[in-house]
Image (cartoon, rainbow, N blue to C red):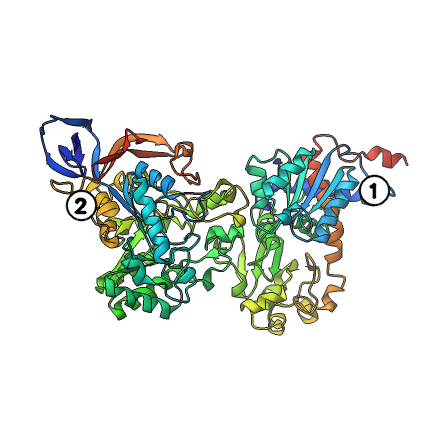
Amino acid sequence: MSKILIRGAKVLGGEPQDVLIDGEVIEAVGTGLSAEGAEVVEAAGKVLLPGLVDLHTHLREPGREDSETVLTGTRAAATGGFTAVFAMANTFPVADTAGVVEQVWRLGREHGYCDVQPIGAVTVGLEGKKLAELGAMHESAAGVTVFSDDGKCVDDAVIMRRALEYVKAFGGVVAQHAQEPRLTEGAQMNEGVVSAELGLGGWPAVAEESIIARDVLLAEHVGSRVHICHLSTAGSVEIVRWAKSRGIDVTAEVTPHHLLLTDELVRTYNPVYKVNPPLRTERDVHALREALADGTIDIVATDHAPHPHEDKDCEWAAAAMGMVGLETALSVVQETMVDTGLLDWAGVADRMSVKPAQIGQATGHGRPVSAGEPANLTLVDTEYRGQVDPAGFASRSRNTPYQGRELPGRVTHTWLRGKATLVDGKLS
Amino acid sequence: MQRHLISAADLTRDDAVLILDTAEEMARVADRPIKKLPTLRGRTIVNLFFEDSTRTRISFEAAEKRLSADVINFSAKGSSVSKGESLKDTAQTLEAMGVDAVVIRHGASGAPYRLANSGWIDAAVINAGDGTHQHPTQALLDAFTMRRRLIGRDAGLGQDLSGRRITVVGDVLHSRVARSNVDLLHTLGAEVTLVAPPTLVPVGVETWPCEVSYDLDSTLPKCDAVMMLRVQRERMNAAFFPTEREYSRRYGLDGDRMARLPEHAIVMHPGPMVRGMEITAEVADSDRCTAVEQVANGVSIRMAVLYLLLGGNEPAVTHSRTEEK
């Protein structure tokens, strides 16, 4: 097997070290390691992280291959430094059977750019009425452990309770898209000062917070664990903080865009800023950053949501909700968390690799950078600054809110079990 | 003046006064036997209406024709829009036919803004009402009506509405008329009070340049004009208020309430009125109600806006000819 020597990288942002990969595993970590028989990657000044893990990706296949496929989505993931992504279930057909989740899982393996772990739907057709065959999806080749109706909320309290109880049999977790549907009928953006002025239907914070409050109490009552998708408000942070202090088994994620952008951007009526949950206020952004820093929010997840150009090149109300995020996630986290001093690189590794791998039980991912571990690694040029140019995206879609924005950091190399998927910023 | 008219908030005090003054000149044309000016001869204006609105469309059409523009009316019903054509394609198709200005009415808030700012077309864009966002020419014609009635046709020239107290009553939450009026009246120096049940006031209203009250009776004795907004009966199905009768009792304007207004105060309504809901027939048909006058003034205001956006620097009206006659 081939050997790769990553020379002089700041492992988790620490002192420069050499990392020797042999085949699929890390053989040694240290200083002055021999380069004999190894391909050398000069990494002086760069930061080496465990391969990133995204617990919340929309790969769109099957059904919406015009916006993304497992191939293009995993190429985007590798470009962004990810070695594993969890593919959401809201495809066409919905990933609510063993057949669909196995198909997605298999496509990921065939393409080989990153591991694709399908998420199974909680309810049949995401309709919130009847539990999908969660056990069958778990026992399938895909080995599903995370279940979510993401895009829709499991709003029926009884269905949610049953799902939380049922997945205990095989150690699964329900990932809730917290959105009270009646409070968000016709919702177009965050409800507040800006929506009042723009005359766009409001998506109130309480619609998210009330569901989170209910679900942490349900999780406590039935002794199960619950994961909160894309938490977006200061109030949600308070509820999760309270739940954790009570010992409730809850984890939560925040998206990069909710760490950086606010609803003031909606004043442009440019649907590239239309996303669900919506961009919130400055106060929320600060609360989310602090919560990610102090661990109240466990992880960053992209909610990478590709849409074709025509679905964004229109009036606000007609536009689709969502933003692509895999290729800019680490840069946004560096901008909002590292360069602000809220988190060090070891913290980034924890929030973007270790913890998401734990929550999703992604074996072999989110491991320490040390001898004997699988060689899932990401090398980052943290000194880089540059404008985001969607024309260069590996994703099939271009709906990024960061076009033309200057962001720091650039992933130069990604290794999936010792195999380079990204070399010098180019997919291999 | 800007190149487009998207929001009443985009107008400065001087822009707004200029439009009102120009509208007074335009109104004089309406008093002539031949109500037509050559100002926009050879210019093509499309009235792009994605929402039914006979009165606003006709008002714009009358204004365009009096300025001698070529007018194309486009209604979304029965057009390619109903077959799924996008706003962008519709606008580009029309522009390819040589359109100088687009007057757009759209159900989606922000559609005119997108049309003006997305690089889709080069034509001037005039917002004729977008979703629950803005309806700037309505606010202008309302201000025009107030200035005429409260200050005077000639005395009002060059004047704004400083110190006038205006009360706007009704479904503020869903009203583009309310939003436009709050912006423009504030710019013109008026003091605005919004009156509505709390369910029909948007969350976030606290940053608007106006007062908010839930009590109509206490505001009536101290206002110079009260503007009644239409309240759609369907709102009660979404629990915005319990019943039509309760709404009328608490927020409707009847003869008794009208009697509590100062003597000089006027009653306004942008139409269409729901008689028996927000306004009784007695009030609607009284001399104090300016609803019909507002419609007439709408044509003058739209002439002024079109002239100022498209007409360039030539004077709109040549007075010498009328004087010779």
Quadrant in the rendering for residue B38: top right
The residue under label 1 is which amino acid type?
A: Lys
Q: Is residue A287 left or right of residue B18?
A: left
Residue B166 horizontal/vertical position (percent): 62, 56
> Which residue is label 2 attached to?
A367
Q: Nearer the viewer, residue B310 or A392?
A: A392
Characterize the local packing of mark 2: few (<14), some (14-19) or many (20 or more) Cα atoms within 10 angstroms: many
Residue at image location 51% in from the left, 47% down from the top = A319
Chain on which label 1 sits: B
Quadrant in the rendering for residue A44: top left
Q: Is residue A246 above or below residue A364?
A: below
Q: Is residue A67 left or right of residue A223?
A: right
> Which residue is label 1 attached to?
B35
> If the image is split into quadrants, where does the C terminus of chain B sit?
top right
> If the image is split into quadrants, where does the N terminus of chain B sit?
top right
Label 1 and label 2 in one chain: no
Label 2 residue SS: loop
Label 1 residue SS: loop
Residue A241 horizontal/vertical position (percent): 26, 59
Q: Is residue B240 visible?
A: no
